[in-house]
Amino acid sequence: MLDLIAQTDPKTLWNGPNNSAYLITMIVIALVVGFGAMFGLMAAPARLRLPIVGVVTFISGFYYVLLWLYPAPIDRSPANAPRGPFEAASFWLADAQPIATTLANTIAGFLLGLGIYSLLRIHLRKIAKQQQDWGYSFVLVLSLIAMTLFGYWDWIIRQSPAGSSLTYAPGPDWRLPQFGRDLLFDGVLQQMDAAMFSLIAFFILSAAYRAFRARSVEATVLLGAALIMILSLLTAVDYGWNMLVERVAGDNPNSLIQNFQLTVMANWVKETLQNSSIRGLDFGVGIGLLAMGLRLWLSLEKIGGEA
Amino acid sequence: MSDTTRSQNLGSKLQSLPRQWLYLILIICAAVPLFFSVAIPDQPDASSIDFFANVMSLKPGDRVLVGTDWTNGTRAESGGEMEALLRILIRKGVKFAVYSTGDPQAPQVFRDTMERVNDEEAKAGSRKYERFNDYVVCGYFPNSEGTNRNINDNVLQAFAGRMDHTEGGPPTDVRQSPVFQGVSSLSDFKMLILVTPSNTDTITLERVKKTKLLFMVTGVMVPTDQTYYASGQLKGLCGGIKGVFDIETLMRTGLAQGQSSKWGAIPGFPDKPNAGRATKYYLALHACLTLLIVAVIVGNVGMVLSKKVAR
């Protein structure tokens, strides 16, 4: 693992020469500081935790607000130096962005660990106490362990020069780790993923049959628009319909009848009705998101207006 | 039995067909057409034509970024889209870097797909693409918003520390790949093509400005992305199985002179195998959507009959 981290250039605070004391020291310091901060936060009194989280949230959000609002450097080359404090701030904001993104990616990675910890805590307890449906919990934990084991086993082998030429489809060089990973990932997980998604077709058909009724004028308009859009997806129908309209219209491309080609009607629905409606919705959602973002950034969501 | 009672019975019967029968008919509609090969005529959408024309405008050695956020849940649509895209990129000799901000499984699903398409293309006479030299996989990034902003502002820093390797070689920083040679900004990539079934479409669109954006999305996402295509923010859009069918048709026939007001004639690949998932699934889609229309009509006829009698 150290080899992989150390290959990243240029060498900065965040990496270092392979197997160097510097790199190992930095990793140890980062771990100590990270765990220290985590345990410190856990040990802090409850009334202090909220302001700490609020301050961290505000600082994190403030950086991205500045990045959005502050003038960004234009056509900057690596040799350029800032010509004053205003430009220096602009450069600093731009340079800090990869670090901020890496930090956010790392924190998101930790969330995965937190999720696994939480999952194991709940389900191992259930298995130990043989609570109701503990068998499902056993299958879950077993699947988690098997997938992790075979996934990493195969991955580690593929990192070596000999392993890097292994194919992802079954081949003569495949051994237990490759067959295990393939069975679990491609054979089980991916197929179950596809099977779950395909169930939607049954729900859609059932729901359309039972609920899609022309009970009012609005519902009838909706039904008509949906019919035009669905028929326009059936290119065999689309093709035949358009041929018929063209035949009725004769050789006149400006005939009013030409507007009744399925493609023309579907495009009219898309460009005139659908696009404008969705833009309206998007504006509304955008304003709502802005308001929600502000409330979260300023921690008003948790502590209300009393802060 | 009187006519009124008969109509009432028929009306209520039509409105309450057993769910199991509907499901059985759906299974038949989805499965049986897969065994038949029927040539279905097609009139490609303007958005698909723009997508095809933009990708076909790439020259050998050009570089593109490919975002892949799909897994096998949407393989009928996204899988077909990715396969069609890879065939064009391989045939055109375009180098590409792949990343995901949508799903941790996506890079592995891409590797599986790439290996299969690469083998098929090699058998069809194309040059076999070399991992790391012709394409490079930069992995998964959990923070989509920050990563996309970073890709736009500093593409090399965005992929710093990510490793991939040649066949038989050690893991190496992806930026040392020939795909990244001469790249200093996102504008050095001719375009960013995103294959996604999730909300990473809007996240990318809101943040990536320095290169052309082309999306390949699922059918349900088309209405949303259509607005961005209509506004010119997207230079091409391939949506759902219809979109892939359009691309596969254009790959076979090419774009004829006068077929589009924006583009001239663009030759396709008539001597290569172009039929992919969409060609295979399109008849099944026809059958399933026809069943949906019939089911809605049956339900409504039942409602009308019941109402008539009630009056």
Image (cartoon, rainbow, N blue to C red):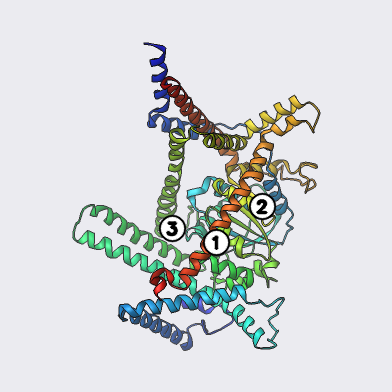
Residue beneath label 1, please? A287
Q: Position of residue A261 (x, y in %)?
A: 69, 33
Q: Are marks 2 and 1 in contact (CB under 8 Å)?
A: no
Q: Is residue B42 visible in this depiction of the protein?
A: no
Element marked by disc 3: helix
Q: Nearer the viewer, residue B116 or A194?
A: A194
Residue beneath label 2, please? B229
Q: Are marks 3 and 1 in contact (CB under 8 Å)?
A: no
Q: Position of residue B301 (x, y in %)?
A: 48, 25
Residues at marks 3 and 2, common chain? no
Q: Nearer the viewer, residue A35 or A27?
A: A35
Q: Say which amino acid is labelled 1.
A: Ile
How far apart marks 2 and 1 lie (CA) works out to 22 Å
The quadrant of the image that shows the C terminus of chain B is top left
How busy is the neighbourhood of tag 2: few (under 14 within 10 Å), some, or many (20 plus)?
some
Query: Which one is closest to the eye, mark 3 or mark 2?
Result: 2
**Picture quadrant of residue B256:** top right
